Each structure stands twice: as C-alpha cells, then as structure tokens.
Amino acid sequence: MADLKQDTSRAPSHAGERFFMRFTRAQRYMHAVLFSTFLGLAATGLPMRFSESFWARRFASGIGGFGTIIFFHKFFALVLTVAFLIHVKEVFTRGLIHREKGIFWGNTSMVANWKDVKDLFGHMRWFLGLGPKPQFERYAYWEKFDYWAVFWGMIVIGFSGYAMWFAPFFAHFLPGWALNAVLVIHSEEGLLAILFIFSIHFVNTHLRPDSFPMDMVIFTGVESEEEFKTKRPEEYQRVAAEGKLESRLAVKPPVWLLNFSKVVGFTAIFIGLLLLVLTLSAYFGS
Amino acid sequence: MKTASSIAFALGALLVFAMPRVAQAETDCLSCHGDKSLQDASGHSVGVDAGTFGASLHGSMKCGDCHTTIKDYPHPDQVTPVKCESCHTGEAERLVGSVHANRAEHSCTSCHGDAHAIFPKGDPRSAVYPLNIPHTCGACHGNDALAKKHGLPNVYPMYIDSIHGFALSKEGLLVAANCQSCHGSHHILSHTDPQSPTYKTNIPKTCGTCHAGIAANYAGGVHGKAVAAGDLHAPVCSDCHTAHAILQPTEATFRMQSTPICGSCHKDKLSTYRDTFHSQLGSLGGYVETARCWDCHGAHDVLPASDPRSPIAPANLVATCGKCHAGANASFVQYQPHANAHNRKLNPALYFIRLFMNLLLAGVLTFFMIHTILWLIRSRYQQIKTRPAKGGKNG
C-alpha cells in the first residue's frame, strides 16, 4: 500500500484532477469567429480611422491600398453579421422554442440581475480590502458586460457600417445629417470596442493573475475542478447541490489542443496589443 | 604632320565639292581652322566644321564679317570676341534688363550653341528648336550647383517629367510648352517682375495662349475674378498645377497630392474634409476615384454654392453627388461633406452625437481602467498571501 501511495505522488500532479465542461463546441467556434473577424475589422478599420498616420498609409499601400482595405473590412463585416444572426437565432430557438430555462433570466442567463449589482460593489470593496470576495455564478458581471458591449456594439457598428456601405439606399429613410452621424458613431464605437477588448477584456479575462497568461477555457471548453471552484464558487455549489456535477464532467484537454489554442490565442493577443499600441500612438500623436 | 595635312587636304576637297556657298577666299582661314581639333593657347576649340558652317544660317557670310578685328595672317593669339549685336540689334536690346543681361555669364552661344552651327529655330539642328530648348536651358537650369548659387529651383528634371516634358520628349509635340513658351526668350524676366509673363497675375494669360478654353473658364470662376481684381492670394494656374512639375490632373499622383494644395488656403475646409470618409479612403492610396475638392467644386470655374451654375448649388447636388453615388437622391445630398462635429451651432445633431460617443468611450474606459488596475493589485496580493511557496516573496 505504501508503494502505491508513493506511485500516485510521483504521477503528474493533476492526474486525479477532474475537468468540467463550461463552453460547448459551438460556443467556442462562435468565439473564434468573433475574435478573428474582430481582429480583421480592427486591422482594416484602424487605418481608415487614422488614415493620416504613417503606419496606416504604409499598411494600406502594402496590402494594395484602400480598395483592398475596404474589401476585407466588408468581408469580415459580412462574416460577423452572419455569426451574429446565427447567435441571435440560437438564443431565441433555445429560449422560445425549446423553452430552455435560464436563457433570458436566472443564474445562467446573460441578462444582468440584482446579484450582478451586488457583486460589482462587493468586488470593489474586496479590491480595497473592505469585504470578502463575491461568490460568482456562471457569468460574472464583467463577463455579462463584455457580452452586452459586444452585442450592442455589433448592432450599432453594424447598422452604421451598412448605412455607409449602402448610403443612397439608407438615404430613403434617414435624414441627411444621419449620413454624417453614422461615420462618427461607427468610428467612435469601433474605437471604443478596440480599446476595450485589447486592454480591458484581455486583462480581465486572460492576463489577470488568476488566469495568466491566458484563460484556456474558451479554447478547450473545459476547466479543472479547482478553477471551477475558485472562479465560480456559487455555480459550483449550485450544480453540486442539484446533483448535476457528474453530467458536466469532461475529459482533460489533449496536449495538441492546448498547444494549438496557445498559438491561436497568443497570436490574437499579440495582434490585439500591436493594434492597441498603434491606435494609442495615432490617437495621441495627432 | 603628314596626317594633319592630308586631313586638311581631304577637308578642303570636301569643301570644294560639297559646299560651293563657302567663298573661295575662306579657304585661307580654313586651311588652319578647318582642323576641327585645333585649339587655342587656353585649350578652347577654334576648329570650324566647314560643312556644317556652310549649311548654317550664317553659311553665306565671310569669316571677317563676324571676326572683324582679324585683317591679315598671322593674326594675334588674343582676338576680340565677336559682337552678335552689331547685326542682331533687336535681340541685344531685349536682353537688357533681362535675367540673362550679364553677357559675360550668358553669351549668345550659351543658348544658340556653336557659333558656326547656327540654324533657324524651325530647324531640328538648332539649339533653340522647340524640341531642343529644354535640353539647351537645362544645361544651366538642370544643374544643382548653379541652381543653388542663384537661389533657383533645379527645374529641368521637374519639367522633363511633367506632362509638357513628356509631350515634348516622348511624342515630339512641337506645340507642347517648352521653357520659352512661358518665359520668353531674350527678354526673360523674374517672376517677381510685373512685366514678366510668369508674374502671378500674368500667368492665366500666359497659360491661356495654349489653354484658351480653360483660361476662359478660369476667368469666370471665383479664383479668376479675384486675381483679376488684384487679389494676389487667389490661386493662378501654377498654384495648383505647379510651374514645372505639371502632372496630368487625372493621374493618381496628382489626385493624391491635390487636396493639400487647395487646403493650403482653405484650411478649415481641409480639416473638415479630413474628418470624412472621402478623405480617409483617399489618403490610403490605391483608390484615387474618391472625391477630391474639384470633383465637387469644379476645377477652373469654381463658383459659390449661391451661383446656380455651381456644381454645389442645391439644385445641382443630386447630379454632382450622383457622378459617383449611383442612386443619390434629395435626402442623400443633405449629407454635409464638410460637417464639423465640434461645431455646436453649425451641426448640432452631429455635435451631440459625437459628444455622447466621446463621453461613452471615456466613461467606459475610465471606469474599467480603474476597476482592472485595482483588481490586478488585489488579486496579485491575494496570490502572494495565499500561495507563498509558489510565487510569494517569502517563498
């Protein structure tokens, strides 16, 4: 028996660790489509927003000038629009047709509730050492904010973008000044999205000490029991109390998936941070 | 010496058969000066190609007609320079007061070439034949050191790559503007001289000698009227097109560089144009079709929107915008291509939308920046406190 005990201690430290499902395959793919089109839109949109900056002209002429930039911008916009529509359809199918509980309201919903308000203030009290750390549910308030920021952003940026793309058509039912306004809205909201994602989202989700250097759950879909317990204790306890922990069990992500995810994730973060630096240099340089 | 004399003989023979116009008496001079390699004590060529000279404009004249101080042989080493003005009195008079008035620096031959090979200006062999003029002037005005010395731009390379230069050098277009077409020939004056054809207010007339239609359009526009009224700030042809490096206006290079030219006077309009999509896509290159100033305002006959003939007059906007935007309608042309989102009085709706967007951006980022920084500090502190063995200072 003593030998056996020694064997387990020599085995990889997390050998006995359990893994739980957090995101479905479809959700991970949705995130992949979202961030790759977002990077594409940012990379092609920023040169237009800061068309006077040195890097914008170099980048634009390097890939074939404005024609190429706008072609890819529209291409990524179309892909993202399709992804957005698929997501909306999915949400309504699950919530209205399949009558799935917790889509529009409750512990597992993306819709903000009173607990999120309490968590926000509780979290900030904890930052200052004035109270205990809040016990988060499936989606913490900052995650819900990320979701709705993207949701609102896609509607606002998308609508204003299409209004410019098909300006003569939109002019049939929009007043003339709205055609001026859509560019202001599009570029300011786009800038907000870029600055937010490449600084706040990157740090909140990936670069903070608890997840550093990257939260792999969005790539692998699963997380370890320890992570589940510490990051979302209330969800863990609720699922355990419901006796549904077993049904959420998943296999440990294979090494290739982890490595692949790291390459993709770090590439995205690198591009994002590069764009952030260029944006800030153009914003404060001009 | 044997070779030299046989060459002289051969030349003499050639003269006799080929150039009967050269008087027999000149063979005396040519017996020495017919040797083209002949040099004086200071190394200047004093050889004369009898054949070329005989065919030249002065071929029927005798050596002594110009070289008046040489009466007999042997003549002194130093001879008085030829005075062209003793015959060409009109040209000499026009040179007085011109930029080339200093005859020691600018001899007749510096433009007209070899004195013994002067041809009529319509002859392709002439140094002042239209197609040869840029090269002739460029001998000095294509020289960096000389240009710097006189504080002038080195214009020859600019001209030769211009639309005029191309028409002349590539197509041999005799009517293409060469140096002399704009600057004149003997009485060339500085562009600061009100008499000069290149003086600001004279430029429309100078360019109009060829571009008559455009000159008429220009005269009817706001710029033409202002210049005619003596406003020296208003642009003439060269302010937009440059003087020497004139490009084909539809060419990408010109379209790309043109907006700042208008903007150098219309600064407020340039800055509001810069805020628009027209400018953004125009700056990035590869898309030269995007609207530049004159695509909407017209180029030569620029007129205010209050003039019904102006392309930006309210009644003409649908047609003007419709040149690029198929399907432009009355509502579409309410778009303001020079809207100023920072001007509350002119563009109130846009002003408040921009303000809202800016506040949203600043508010969200400020809140989350503070939130994230506090969070980072707190969670790192927590990490160090709870896991000293793995990453804490006391580990």
Image (tube, coloured by chain):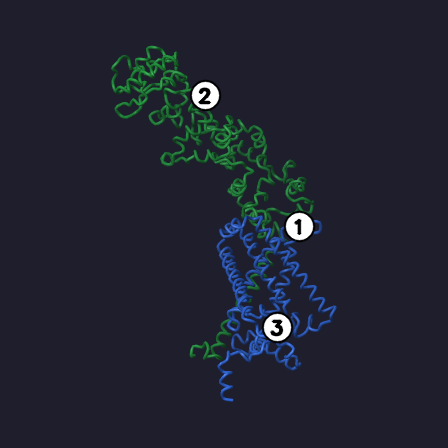
Query: Horizontal placement of B233 versus A91: left or right?
Result: left
Give SS at disc 1. loop
Q: Give the residue type that dot 3 points to.
A: Arg
Q: Is residue B10 above or below residue B275?
A: above
Task: Supply the letter of whichever chain is green.
Answer: B
Nearer to the camera, A204 or B93: A204
Kindly identify which residue carries mark 3.
A22
Density class for disc 2 (Cα within 10 Å; few <14, some 14-19, many ≥20) is: few
Q: Which residue is mark 1?
A: A166
Q: Quadrant of residue A75?
A: bottom right
Chain coloured blue here: A
Residue at 48 percent of width and 27 percent of height: B181
Q: Residue at x 57, y 32 (%)?
A: B218
Q: Chain of mark 2?
A: B
Q: Residue at x 42, y 20 (%)?
A: B119
3 or 1: tag closer to the N-terminus: 3
- Position of B240 compared to B29: left or right? right
Tag 2: amino acid: Asp
Q: For mark 1, name the chain.
A: A
Q: Is residue A4 visible?
A: yes
Mark 1 residue type: Phe
Mark 1 or 2: in front is: 2
Determine which of the numbered discs, if any, sits on residue B376 in the image: none
Please state which of the two labelled residues, at mark 3 or mark 1, is closer to the viewer.
3
Circles 1 and 2: CB atoms closer than 8 Å: no
Left or right: A279 in relation to B151: right
**Vertical relation: A39 (above or below) B370:** above
Secondary structure of residue under mark 2: loop
Which of A73 and B324 lies nearest the eye of the viewer?
A73
Report x, y in % for residue B385.
Answer: 47, 79
Alpha carbon distance from label 3 to label 1: 40 Å
Q: Which residue is mark 2?
A: B123
